[in-house]
Amino acid sequence: MRDFSIQRLVISLAIAAVVMLLLPLGMNTFVLTPLLIYGLLGMSLGLIWGFGGILCFGQAAFFGLGAYVYAISAINIGESTFPMLLAILIPAVFAAILGAMMFYGRLGDVYLGVITLVVTLIFFKFMNSTAGPEYVIGTARLGGFNGIPGFQTLNVPGMADEYIYGDSLYYVTFVILVLVYWLVNGLLQSPFGRIAIAIRENEQRASLMGYDIRARKTTLFAIGGAIAGLAGALYANWAEIVTPGLFSLGQTAEIIIWCIVGGLGTRLGPILGAAGLGYLKFLLGQQAFLDNAIVMGLILVLFVLFLPKGLIPAIEDIWSLSVGKRRRRRPARRRKRRALSNG
Amino acid sequence: MDLAAVIVVETVYIIASLVLISAGLAIVFGMMKVINLAHGEFMMMGGYATITAVHLGVNIYVAMLVIAPLVVGLIGLVVERLVIRYLYGRLVDTMLATWGLSLFFVGGVTMIFGNTTTGISTPIAGVSVGDYQINGYNFFIIIVAALLVLAIWLVLKGTRIGLIARGTMQRADMADALGYSPDRIYMATFFAGSAISGLAGAVLAPLVGLVPSSGGNYIAKAFITVIAGGPSVIAGLLSSSTIFGVVNQFFTFAISPVFGEVALLVAAVILLRLLPQGITSRFFRGKM
């Protein structure tokens, strides 16, 4: 509970509020909302990869699952409160089952990556093939490659006609992002979070201390799935259509790139990485000369080679080198002098 | 009876194409422990190299069997020198870097060739079996896959180069002490792996409409076949290709092609859960 105090909470809430009110002055909220959603999605992988050491190649599976669950249940129910909850719950349960299967089997890093990747592909292939009229859940047709359009979008809880869209969707998303950020923060400072980091650092040592690694990793994985599902539901509300593209390899790769670029093991890094690269992608989409994938690919390769810790830790390093040096130099000199006079 | 023959040929063909798809990756992963996620893009570029060469008037077999492997092998060489050699021994980092490369290649090919489907027709006519028609090109793929596996086996087991390569993969420091440069051997192995990926992509190119993102269709299959195969390069490749090929064909004929693909992926997940180190960690131990 070291970093957690009322003062810090107030300051960061104030910063968040100022950022929330200032951002729409410079940019369209229609562009801003997906950036926030990407931030949320980046945070979900940042949590399980950066703090839990679980490299999941299938975060897009939970994202897409959240979006699809929201769309399907919104068509069937017609009011958005319960579908939103379902879109968090079902990906979480699915992640828990998948995680339990992998962690109780004590699979290594690479095998975990393969299985999560394959699960994402299964969703992608299956959803692409559901064009026929026999693929129906309730009254919702899955629609194959064309996806599901025309579902009830987010509304004020209890009032199905009061839609939340445009500017208000932006504010709602921002509040959700800040809320989830603080929940994740609290989780990481709780004993559960500290032990998750211990497991990341040395799994064997943590298990010898008596912690049940498998259960803890599964829980963390499920939490990551829940956040990704929430991001998916919000994305469905913003785009007003869900397509199998949400499950694509490109989507999964992007989430990983966000985390690497922003900085693994930092809380803010994946969010900023996601929003920043999302905006870069938006800018690149406006010109036809350079293909998007070339830039994203180059960024990933260059970061892995030259800046594997990501931007935020690198900036912190530079900061502590330039500012921290002056503070640290004096005691060192004194010690040296003492050593000289002793000798 | 005719149907049975068709099913047998189709199943062998699926197994052969899985072998082809995975062989390049199996060499790079099985011997160097480098997971090349740009493998699918190497195959895609092999396909594009073939099509470009054929449009320039080169004989299709020369284009497939000589030009494509050389072009992709050279690309692999450049990639190894510029990126991968700094990442040996860092499994997760190589995965991420090669994933970046794969995006880069998709983007590059899109810029050069455009985001449209290209293709060439198969050079071999169909074969009739009773009431059914089999694509004659399937036999060509089966033969190429068989020859490829045989060639890999002969080179690794029978030649001095293969011996040096295998020795280096086991103990790079000992090979170094005996006067062989591990750096060069890794480079050569990666070249060979890329060239085989290029060959596979070229041979499969007439069967598919090629788009810059075609690599994504191959990479997952190649990846799971190699990982499920386990530590032995050839035995692992053959055993996992056989299992996945049979599962795929069974569900394809029983339900639909999409279900065949999905069943293959589900089988992979189950197999990895049961044998996390791959098939050859339990069976065919110590074989090549």
Image: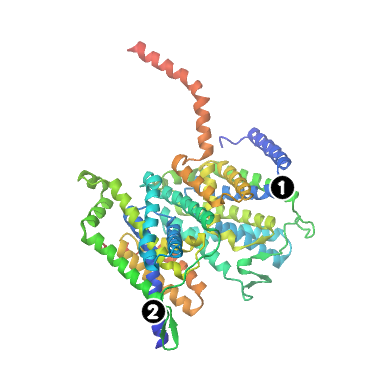
Count numbered badges in the picture: 2
Report if residue B77 is visible in the image: yes
Q: Which residue is mark 2?
A: B9
Q: Quadrant of residue A147?
A: bottom right
**Where is residue A61 shown, x and y percent of the image?**
55, 59
Q: Give percent across and percent down for residue A79.
A: 74, 62
Q: CA distance from mark 2 to mark 1?
A: 57 Å
**Looking at this view, is A130 or B81 the one in front?**
B81
Residue A248 vertical placement versus A166 (above, below): below
Q: Which mark is residue A29?
A: 1
Identify residue type, mark 2: Val
Same subunit under labels 2 and 1?
Answer: no
Rendered position, B71 above or below A131: above
Tell me the chain of label 1: A
Q: Is residue A93 visible?
A: no
- Looking at the rendered structure, which numbered label has been put on residue A44? none
Q: Nearer the viewer, residue A82 or B104?
A: B104
Q: Residues within 10 Å of mark 2 (few under 14, many from 20)?
A: some
